[in-house]
Image (tube, grey):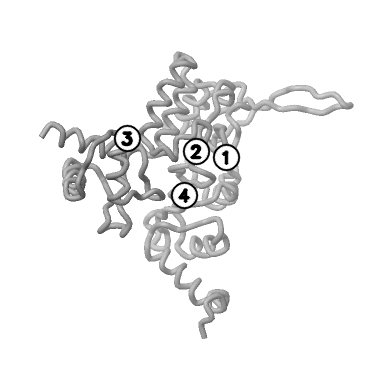
Amino acid sequence: MQTQKVNMFYLLELLTDYSDSEHILTANELIGLLSQRYGVSVERRALYGYINALIYLGYDISDFEDNGKGYYIRQRVFSESEIAMLIHSLHLDPECGRGDVKRISDKLRKFVSVYRRDPDDDFISADNCRSVSAEHIELILRAVREKQKICLDLFRCELSGGTVSETSEKHTVTAHGVLASGGRFYVLCSGENIDNISCVRCDMIRNAELVAEYSQPQSISTDDPGAVSALLRCAESILSELILDFGRNVRILTNNRGYFTVVLQAPAEKLIQWAMLRLSTCEVIEPSYIRDRIINDIKNSAYYREMFQIR
């Protein structure tokens, strides 16, 4: 009985390390890995029992009946974006030494599959983090939370007579959040014109101060029958367009491998038209009826009919 319990957790470790939605393991592959890695022999019936027991214990495992291929862990303790966020925080913590950062980061990466553990992939580099002030990040997040404006003193270079001089320039802005993208931190902010939202690199901030007054930006009312809350997956290349068009209601959820997911509010027809113009870089995930509408419009297009020779 003790050996059987151990085998079940061997299986859990294999699924954690070697499975994800893009790497689904068959029963034969799992049996082979158990033998190769742990030297244990497991029959197919026993394997099914271990998987059922793990599901009963609360592990979200997709099985053959669900995906038609095999087994993988669908929902983990931490998502990739959450792991990235924790590692970003370690780099920014002045009390966390470089050795501690590496040791804890290596432990955190074990919560994702081996295919996602590239130490330089999707994570803020240590060099970039050291140039960002943790105090500035905390102050910006406080401004967002307490709905206060913030005065940013931004680094600036000027060219005069072939000589480069360094200076700074103050901007009073409304901060909407902090985004990690492309190995750097950015603050999403806007000036007096709420539609003119910019991404400012946090390592360009020389000083930051809270401003007492704050003007609450206008937003689309949820009482508007034409307004919907939508979940999108977009390429980073259209981030600026997205913020300029929907900045008042944008909330970045994850940022991973050149794409990010975002929640926003917008009139349904505007959202459909916007997404249709960016089919190669934007995917509407929810609500389902808007996604179905877009798919149906694509199927009714002449390009689709020509591609599949539909008369």
Q: Amino acid at mark 2?
A: His
First reached walking from the N terminus: tag 1 or tag 4: 1
Lower position in the chain sequence, tag 1 or tag 2: 2
Name the residue tied to disc 4: 219
Q: Which residue is mark 3?
A: 37
Report the residue that reaches farthest toward the bottom.
Answer: 311
Q: Residue type at mark 3: give it.
A: Arg
Is 171 on the left or on the right of 103, as rendered?
right
Q: Label 2 to label 3, Cα distance in Å?
A: 48 Å
Mark 2 and mark 1 in contact (Cβ < 8 Å)? yes
- Circle 2 is placed at which residue position? 176
Q: Amino acid at mark 4?
A: Ser
Instruction: List the single residue furthest toward the right.
Output: 161
Determine the residue positioned at 45% across, 25% down.
Answer: 89
Height in image: 281 above or below 140?
Answer: below
Camera-side residue of 98 and 232: 98
- The alpha-carbon separation of the residues under discs 4 and 3 comes to 56 Å
Q: Front-most of 82 and 111? A: 111
Task: Tell whether label 4 touches label 2 (CB within 8 Å).
Answer: no
